[in-house]
Image: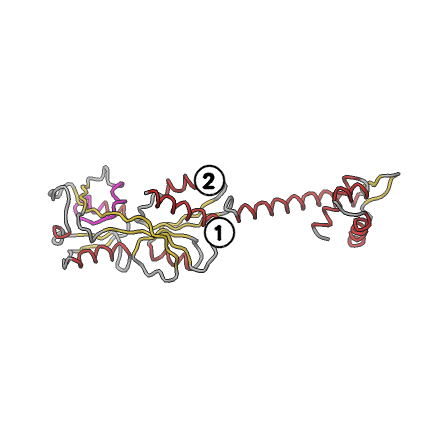
Amino acid sequence: MDIRQLRYFIAIAEERKISAAAQRLHMSQPPLSQQLKAMEEELGTLLLERTGKLLELTESGKALYRYALQVTQLMEEAVTEVKEVGDGVKGSLNLGINTLSSVELPGLLHQFRSRYPHVTYKIQQNESSRLCELVKNRVLELAIIRLPLELDDFSVLHLQAEPFYFITSQQMPALGSAVALSDLQEIPLMLPSTEGLGVYYTIQMAFSAQHLKPNIIAECSDIPLLLQLVSSGFGSAIVPETVIAQLPGRGIRAFPITDDHLSGSMGLISLKGHHLSAAAQHFMELIQIRTTEK
């Protein structure tokens, strides 16, 4: 017995005549009568009995009718939901975002939810290299990461670049309204990343391009802890602009770094050759629009 037969049975039960049911189903009477007989033979029981000119449900028929309504309704809901997921109206957006991301994720998600209110979210924050692994293993569909990284396995949508700032405790002497990397090479510095990651590489290469050797005393990818260390006077740091929003009330001063060599770029990655859900495709489209507008 299949969903088509259940729909036939519902029509017969509700119309109480084979002829009326056949007309409702846009089919001829003989095939419909054959389908009813096949169902009764399969179930081994009489489902309808004639009372005068009308058909009446037997007790077995009443039980089947209740379940047939539930099954066909569930099937219709399933088809509708699958189509909505396919269109990106429903479903889940599995997204990773870098610890030092400059992308305004709350604003993006508010805008996305206004368009697709029934989409749910799974969001992970991690280092860029780890996010690449999660995308490669299909735990995440998309990730916003810091460049540069080895990205041969990924499609990359390049996002905006951002400047870097030198931050130091208010207890330390001021260096002026802005600083150059050459002003910082003797100052004890902490990097907001660890070796092999995008921010670490970006900062080190900026110094190297000017034949400067920074005085690196620590690496700390935990930003709240890094800011505590800076505030205490343990050391100063070079951070992307996105971190500056976390400084008020911490006793930290920030100075823009003037060197053109030092800027951070971001990318939205997905796995090459892997089908993206409609929700992920719509999110990429939204980011592309916002990037174009800036």
Residue 102 image position (x, y, % from top left): 31, 46
Horizontal side, residue 200 vs residue 4: left or right: left
Horizontal side, residue 24 vs residue 97: left or right: right
- Amino acid of disc 1: Ser
Where disc 2 sits, the SS reads helix
* Residue at the image position 26 percent from the left and 54 percent from the top: 199
Q: Which mark is residue 247?
A: none
* Residue at the image position 78 percent from the left and 39 percent from the top: 15
Does residue 97 belong to the magenta stretch? no
Extreme residue in the right direction: 52
Q: Give the range drawn in magenta.
A: 228-246
Q: Distance between the residues labelled 2 and 1?
A: 16 Å
Residues packed near mark 1 inside 10 Å, few (<14), some (14 to 19) or many (20 plus): some
* Residue at the image position 79 percent from the left and 51 percent from the top: 31
* Residue at the image position 24 percent from the left and 40 percent from the top: 247
Residues packed near mark 2 inside 10 Å, few (<14), some (14 to 19) or many (20 plus): few
Residue 147 image position (x, y, % from top left): 30, 55
Could you say which is closer to the camera, residue 50 or residue 249? Answer: 50
Assess whether mark 1 and mark 2 are in contact (beta carbons under 8 angstroms).
no
Could you say which is closer to the camera, residue 169 or residue 111? Answer: 111
Residue 285 image position (x, y, % from top left): 42, 47
> Where does the C terminus fall, quadrant-wise?
top left
- Amino acid of disc 2: Arg
Where disc 1 sits, the SS reads loop
Q: Name the residue under label 1.
A: 277
Could you say which is closer to the camera, residue 63 or residue 95? Answer: 95
Residue 112 image position (x, y, % from top left): 43, 41
The color scheme shown is secondary structure
Does residue 232 belong to the magenta stretch? yes
Does label 2 or label 1 sit earlier along the sequence? 2
Q: Which mark is residue 115?
A: 2
